[in-house]
Amino acid sequence: MPSLLCKWPPLLTVIFLIGCAQTPSRPAPESAETTFGAVGQQEFEPQSESSRTESPAAQPEASGRDNKPRSLTIKLGTQQFIYSVNGEIARTGPISSGAVGYPTPTGKFAVLGKEKDKVSSRYTNQLGMQAWMPYAIQFHGHYFLHEGWLPGYPDSHGCVRLGEKDARFLFEQMQLGDPVDVVD
């Protein structure tokens, strides 16, 4: 008859995995955001966090939501996003788009929905649990912009990952119907 102790290791493994399967804490990563010197400038110019400034267009009016047109451009070739308000660049930053075999769709899209604490219905994490996609902004079918790991190259299943600060900022600023252009 097997001893009771032989049954403990699998039970302890299950308890350990369940204990580790909690919502991760999100320390704010160092941001590699960039700004532009002039509207329409093609080169990204990295600046230090202390010298970085956001244009006044990035700040909503004191009365709440403003009615200035907002737009977001995702540049897959340079792995960058460009957020504009009223035709002026307000914020830029790094992204990670779809890896080989999981392309991020290109084209003209719009914000279809937003969910602050989204959980993927398609993909799982390393523990086999549904993947967490905080600050999710749906822009096409099952494709979202959301907070995630930024390795410096395309690495997602087709979604557009953003750093925590950028994901939160865009989630707060973008509204349903705002244009999202994804270009090569």
Image (tube, rainbow, N blue to C red):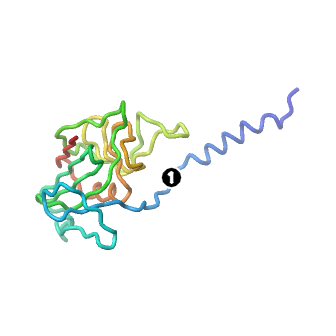
Q: Where, by quadrant of the figure, is residue 155 drawn?
A: top left
Q: Residue furthest bottom?
A: 50
Is residue 112 placed above or below 1 in the rendered structure?
Answer: below
Where is residue 92 drawn, in percent x and y?
25, 58
Residue sitting at x 29%, y 62%: 46
Where is residue 84 drawn, in percent x and y?
17, 57
Is residue 91 placed above or below 96 in the rendered structure?
Answer: below
* Tag count: 1
Q: Residue furthest top?
A: 1
168 or 116: nearer the viewer? 168
Q: How busy is the neighbourhood of tag 1: few (under 14 within 10 Å), some, or many (20 plus)?
A: few
The residue beneath circle 1 is 24
Q: Secondary structure at mark 1?
A: loop
For the residue marked with disc 1, what is the amino acid? Pro
Where is residue 19 drawn, in percent x and y?
62, 48
Q: Residue furthest right?
A: 1
Residue sitting at x 51%, y 39%: 129
Residue sitting at x 28%, y 51%: 80
* Residue 128 visible at all: yes
Point out the image quarter for the C terminus.
top left
61 or 155: nearer the viewer? 155
Point out the image quarter for the N terminus.
top right
171 or 91: nearer the viewer? 91
Where is residue 143 drawn, in percent x and y?
30, 38
Describe residue 103's horizontal placement relative to residue 109 as left or right: right
Q: Where, by quadrant of the figure, is residue 89 drawn?
A: bottom left
Is residue 103 placed above or below 20 in the rendered structure?
Answer: above
76 or 143: nearer the viewer? 76
* Residue 67 visible at all: no
Residue sitting at x 39%, y 45%: 118
Describe residue 173's horizontal placement relative to residue 32 as left or right: left
